[in-house]
Image (cartoon, coloured by chain):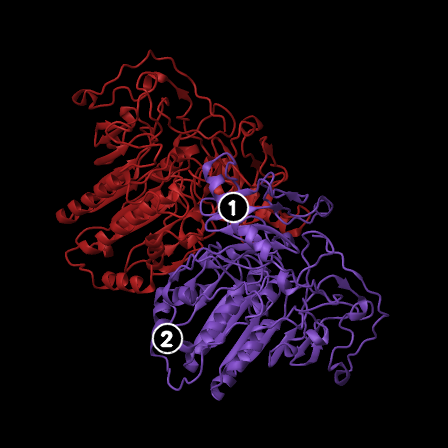
Chain colours: A purple, B red
Amino acid sequence: MSLKTVICVLWAVCVGHTEGIQHGPNIIIMLMDDMGWGDLGVFGEPSKETPNLDVMAAQGMLFPNFYTANPLCSPSRAALLTGRLPVRNGFYTTNAHARNAYTPQEIVGGISQDEILLPELLKKKDYVSKIIGKWHLGHRSQYLPLKHGFDEWFGSPNCHFGPYNNSVRPNIPVYNNSEMTGRYYEEFEINVKTGESNLTQIYLKEGLDFISQQATAQRPFFLYWAPDATHSPVYASERFLGKSQRGRYGDAVMELDDSIGQILAHLVSLGIHNNTLVFFTSDNGAAVMSGAHQSGSNGPFLCGKETTFEGGMREPAIAWWPGRIPAGTVSYQLASVMDLFSTSLSVTGVLPPDDRVIDGLDLSPVLFNNSLLDSRPIFYYRGNQMMAVRIGQYKVHYWTWSNSWEEYNTGINFCPGQEVPGVTTHTQEEHTMQPLIFHLGQDPGERYPISVQSEEYRDVHRQVTAVVEQHQKDLIPGMPQLNMCDLAVMNWSPPGCEQLGKCLKAPESNPWKCVWPH
Amino acid sequence: MSLKTVICVLWAVCVGHTEGIQHGPNIIIMLMDDMGWGDLGVFGEPSKETPNLDVMAAQGMLFPNFYTANPLCSPSRAALLTGRLPVRNGFYTTNAHARNAYTPQEIVGGISQDEILLPELLKKKDYVSKIIGKWHLGHRSQYLPLKHGFDEWFGSPNCHFGPYNNSVRPNIPVYNNSEMTGRYYEEFEINVKTGESNLTQIYLKEGLDFISQQATAQRPFFLYWAPDATHSPVYASERFLGKSQRGRYGDAVMELDDSIGQILAHLVSLGIHNNTLVFFTSDNGAAVMSGAHQSGSNGPFLCGKETTFEGGMREPAIAWWPGRIPAGTVSYQLASVMDLFSTSLSVTGVLPPDDRVIDGLDLSPVLFNNSLLDSRPIFYYRGNQMMAVRIGQYKVHYWTWSNSWEEYNTGINFCPGQEVPGVTTHTQEEHTMQPLIFHLGQDPGERYPISVQSEEYRDVHRQVTAVVEQHQKDLIPGMPQLNMCDLAVMNWSPPGCEQLGKCLKAPESNPWKCVWPH
């Protein structure tokens, strides 16, 4: 993009129509799937293929220190919508120590009825809420989005793995609101060989249409736009396939970037950009274990998805609200996906629940005044175990683990090309008595542990210990929802299958404790 | 920086005075020392502390695929000024296989009389040339800058190591033109404990004054601005110390960034920005072996300085010439420091020497029209050995080596935190018959070699083999200049030492073949 383009867009932003706004601001959360911190041009991806996101940053606020709550999709998404750590909202497992759990279609559980999700709260102010794309908080009927505050949904409850044979395993359904409208690899094609699929275009159109409808109706809206083209198997539509310098994964990124540009331009053309907070981020680090063709970049950070190293949990993040968020700013605030919950409530004037711990912070002072909030910890959980904590520039590892030797020896590598002795360990290593401490400013790659004999180490250790002890003292773990699996609960006969003639026969129920290998 | 600032600066650029230009364009090459690709905000350094370089990129052209000619300082600088690979211009060693050699003060050799340097050629068009900072092409009198085309010099012939005791080893002199004006750690203080030194401020003032003088005199000029604050021991002046989120190295970067902002603003204020090509880059990758406090970032790339992996040789690069180079552009051209020689000649209308091979390309079509030149190879040499070659997106390794087990076992690590089995080897591994091939677009970190059984491998191998065979057939290696060492040639009595009373007694001459361990 040229600077001229930036100026032109800015000009459009400035002269956009803003009359007739009578309701609270719209909220759009754009959540990418397995996209890494280093995948954006503005975060140094060498092929610089995200001009729209780079312009979004130039018009908004960039967050280099933004985190997810878990290095895996389902718990991360549950944290975003509840404002609570997975260990509180139940999106974790106790089947084994420090295991990442999620919602494959054999999972029995899902988001608890006791949790209060962002769209439920926004109803108090008459917001219309839609989720487009991947839900991932449970696919059984009681767990679906329209049972948890969303008014509309177009997308899927699970990952787009497949194709399956529909006898031992059904293909994943795609929903339109409360009923399925087809299945992946059937009505919704994904060619895993060529990587071609129109899904991102469908999700884009769904998003543009929803925005138009609410703008016309002058209703405030919450759009949770969660496309999954960058999750393996990655895909892109024909127009983008082969366009990237970095292969199919890059094609998917370019299509998402283009779509985001279209959504922002649509807000401007409708004149509602000055009344819409847009936040872009990703659910976890790039899935570097999937190899060069199917995964993105975590930039200078260590390892990726599934791990509690920076590559697993630091996310690209941009906030955009022309006229409210100062353009071209960088915020060093330590922030989290859970803050999107609290911030959305704050800007819409809704009070958060007062009967539970909320881990999110209201980032309004950060967004509107570029303030820095008081030092807040970032907790790095893997399943039921707090593995590490960051306070200020310091990250303290109490447990380290990449994956097991058994997995590693079969070729699954969560840290390809990277190895820090004693850090990227293949056995679960406890360091509670003498944690590993890194200064992430000086050492973003977590390569050089601070000497345990230094004064710096002792000072940091003392300070962080107090915070961790308080956290653990106050912590009441939620009921774990991701412990049980059963082939009978898979997507055999989702609601709406009858009309489509797509109901399948489920096997007998035979539940077991899910095995989470890492 | 805010976008507002960018727009304001742009405005100043647009309305700047441009009357009275009667001569060819001025050339400024800003060459950093050991600064890594990933050290710029625009290339993803997480603390985003280079606002002036980021604005320079927004006003100019960014090169994500820019290379040095050697992963070490002296050969890289010799290549820049001669437009020729070190193996041609003599800046290499044959003492052992594939060894990095440079110009410590015991080196006997330096830049050959037979080489023609850029400032010598620019004299044909009456350019005034000045080097500020580090020379590094030999410190004995016949090798100094004023013997090789520069009209002025303020700086030093060697690295700022020390302090020395002046009996077994003299401190390094600082020259003002053809005579020394003091020594490091004596008249020119560097506090290795606190990291404080005013040297960057001195180099900045020298640069601003030189520009002012030439502008007043309406003479075309070539300024080679080569500060060394980011070379270990890194330093910054008081105003910048402690300011960076990433420690002392970051302080040095922030001061350099500030200085570059001042130089560009000075060009604008003098109204000569529309007649000045400014090129920013670095001499080699970040010296990651020096640890978190003394080294920078190579972003997503493998290893660093001293190696022929991307971290050793890919450099940050920005071209700036308001009104000529389109603002806010990214060029994917594979380019090299040697191109700065050819491009400078081209834009000033000087013909290159026709009696020798010039490895540099004229980048004018790239700079002015954002064209891509025909596929050109990038050769990765380590001493006398071509280790790898890049053509298009493909990099082919014929030899791999990080450093020896002996060095590694003493704690010297050229790839800290990184290890790619069979790639970051600790013995020199030859792969000539079946080279390792990476697709740098999909795999910038050189982690996933392409399968030797794939068609892609065979196609690339065939194509690259032809280029390499041609290169090797045509190659006439220069006389190696970096083979001999002698304590007697150290900086005991540089010209000008008498007036200062700073002449020291040299030992007897006792030359030996220098030992280059890596």
Above or below — where is A286 with respect to A141?
A: above
Q: Amino acid at mark 1?
A: Gly
Above or below — where is A118 with respect to B516?
A: below
Tell me the residue that label 2 is attached to.
A13
Residue at the image position 36 percent from the left and 32 percent from the top? B193
Tell me the residue that label 1 is attached to.
A445
User: SS at mark 1?
Assistant: loop
Callout 2: residue from which chain?
A
- Position of residue A171 in the picture relative to residue A195 (left or right): right
Which residue in the rendered view is the most extreme toward the right?
A: A508
Q: Give percent across and percent down for residue A139.
A: 70, 72
- Position of residue A98 in the picture relative to residue B181 (left or right): right
Residue at the image position 25 percent from the left and 64 percent from the top? B11
Q: Give percent across and percent down for residue B369.
A: 36, 60
Can residue A183 be seen from the camera position used here? no
Above or below — where is B431 with respect to A207?
A: above
| In this rendering, the label closer to the viewer, 1 or 2 | 1
State the residue in front, B395 or A178.
Answer: A178
State the residue in front, B367 or A364.
Answer: A364
Q: Amino acid at mark 2?
A: Val
User: SS at mark 2?
Assistant: helix
Residue B224 image-quadrant placement = top left
- Name the quarter where the N terminus of chain B is drawn: bottom left
Callout 1: residue from which chain?
A
Residue B433 image-quadrant placement = top right
Q: Give percent across and percent down for residue A278.
A: 47, 71
Q: CA distance from mark 1 to mark 2?
A: 38 Å
Q: Counting residues from the N terminus, which is met first, the one under dot 1 or under dot 2?
A: 2
Q: Residues within 10 Å of mark 1 (few under 14, many from 20)?
A: many
Can residue B507 be seen from the camera position used here? yes
State the residue in front, A130 or B256.
Answer: A130
> Both on one chain, marks 1 and 2?
yes
